Image (spheres, rainbow, N blue to C red):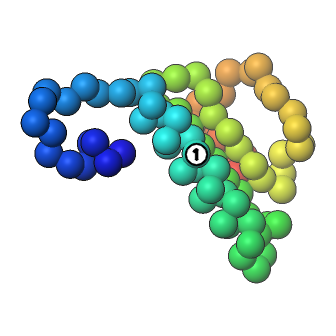
């Protein structure tokens, strides 16, 4: 991250895979912080990896620890999160 923000004297090399890992960890820490709020047990958390076929939905309406292989679109995930 420091290299991306600092002006490099050489040409910058983009690290898309590393950026995805950073975003994944950022989403995880956001979820951890949200669990500390009052009423967190009634909240939902949705993470979707743009351009990929993966998403994570944590919601009181969904079963814990279950991985679905069913195809759904983003609107269906949002409806599940409500």
In this orientation, which residue lies closer to the viewer: 65 or 69? 65
Question: Left or right: where does residue 82 sit relative to residue 25?
Answer: right
In this orientation, which residue lies closer to the viewer: 3 or 54? 3
Question: Left or right: where does residue 69 sit relative to residue 12?
Answer: right
Spot occupied by residue 43 in the image (x, y as percentages of width and height): 73, 64
Q: Is residue 82 visible?
A: no
Residue furthest to the bottom: 38
* 82 in relation to 25, above or below: below
Question: Left or right: where does residue 2 sit relative to residue 55?
Answer: left
Q: Residue at x 60, y 59 (%)?
A: 30
Report the residue marked by disc 1: 25
Q: Residue at x 89, y 43 (%)?
A: 63
Spot occupied by residue 41 in the image (x, y as percentages of width and height): 82, 66
Residue furthest to the left: 9
Residue furthest to the front: 9
* 43 in relation to 45, above or below: below
Q: Is residue 11 visible?
A: yes
Which picture quadrant has residue 75? top right
In this orientation, which residue lies closer to the viewer: 78 or 42? 42
Q: Residue at x 88, y 38 (%)?
A: 65
Quadrant, the N terminus: top left
Quadrant, the C terminus: bottom right
């Amino acid at each position: 991250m420091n290299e991306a923000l600092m002006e490099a004297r050489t040409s910058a090399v983009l690290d898309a895979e590393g950026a995805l890992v950073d975003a994944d960890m950022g989403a995880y820490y956001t979820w951890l912080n949200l669990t500390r709020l009052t009423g967190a047990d009634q909240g939902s958390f949705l993470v979707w990896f743009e351009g990929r076929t993966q998403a994570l939905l944590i919601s009181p309406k969904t079963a814990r620890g279950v991985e679905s292989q069913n195809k759904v679109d983003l609107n269906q995930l949002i409806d599940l999160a409500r």
